[in-house]
């Protein structure tokens, strides 16, 4: 087994919530993608981070837009995760196949998400083949429910 395959297998043992990052460019186009690398970073100031492949258009769009949002998906939102994970999608003027909503600060979010955080860009750092996008949280929403989880390359739910 190659180191890359072993690396992927080892990381598949880490259960994570499923989130979608979205932004709206200054020319009015919206773009988003499903991410597995999302984390809180700081409470004071409130910072979060997402890690995005350098080949993706998202870091450049976020830099131009100055902000983005993270939608934490509800366990019934596999379709939204799959849509935003699909490669080759282009920015659109509005949500197309997935229902969306807008934050008061103008960021697009997935409608019905368990939670979302709207952010201003704090910093972007290139590391290896990814860009770490750090956002300063300016607006939040949270609701009750069960999150969509990803474990061993498949969607899962919380066992209670």
Image: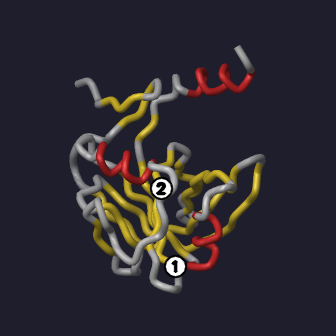
Q: Residues within 10 Å of mark 2 (few under 14, many from 20)?
A: many
Residue behind mark 2: 33
Image height of 150 relative to 70, above or below: above
Residue 11: image location, x then y, percent: 58, 27
Q: Residue at x 74, y 22 (%)?
A: 3
Q: Nearer the viewer, residue 35 or 2?
A: 2
Residue under circle 1? 25
Residue extending farthest front: 88
Q: Position of residue 60 (x, y in %)?
A: 64, 70
Q: Is residue 95 left or right of residue 61?
A: left
Q: Residues within 10 Å of mark 1 (few under 14, many from 20)?
A: many
Q: Is residue 60 above or below residue 56?
A: below
Where is residue 117 shown, x and y percent of the image?
Answer: 42, 63
Considering depth in this image, is 116 or 34 the residue closer to the camera?
34
Q: Residue at x 67, y 20 (%)?
A: 6
158 in relation to 64, above or below: above
Q: Secondary structure at mark 1?
A: loop
């Amino acid at each position: 087994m190659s180191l890359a395959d072993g690396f992927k297998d080892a990381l598949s043992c880490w259960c994570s919530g499923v989130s979608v990052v979205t932004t709206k460019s200054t020319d009015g186009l919206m773009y988003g993608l499903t991410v597995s690398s999302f984390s809180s970073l700081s409470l004071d100031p409130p910072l979060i981070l997402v890690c995005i492949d350098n080949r993706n258009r998202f870091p450049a769009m976020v830099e131009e837009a100055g902000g983005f949002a993270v939608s934490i998906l509800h366990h019934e939102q596999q379709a939204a995760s799959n849509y935003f994970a699909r490669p080759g999608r282009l920015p659109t003027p509005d949500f197309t196949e997935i229902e969306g909503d807008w934050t008061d600060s103008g960021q697009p979010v997935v409608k019905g998400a368990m939670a979302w955080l709207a952010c201003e860009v704090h910093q972007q750092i290139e590391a290896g083949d990814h860009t770490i996008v750090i956002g300063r949280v300016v607006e939040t929403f949270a609701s009750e429910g069960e999150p969509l989880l990803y474990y061993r390359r498949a969607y899962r739910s919380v066992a209670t």
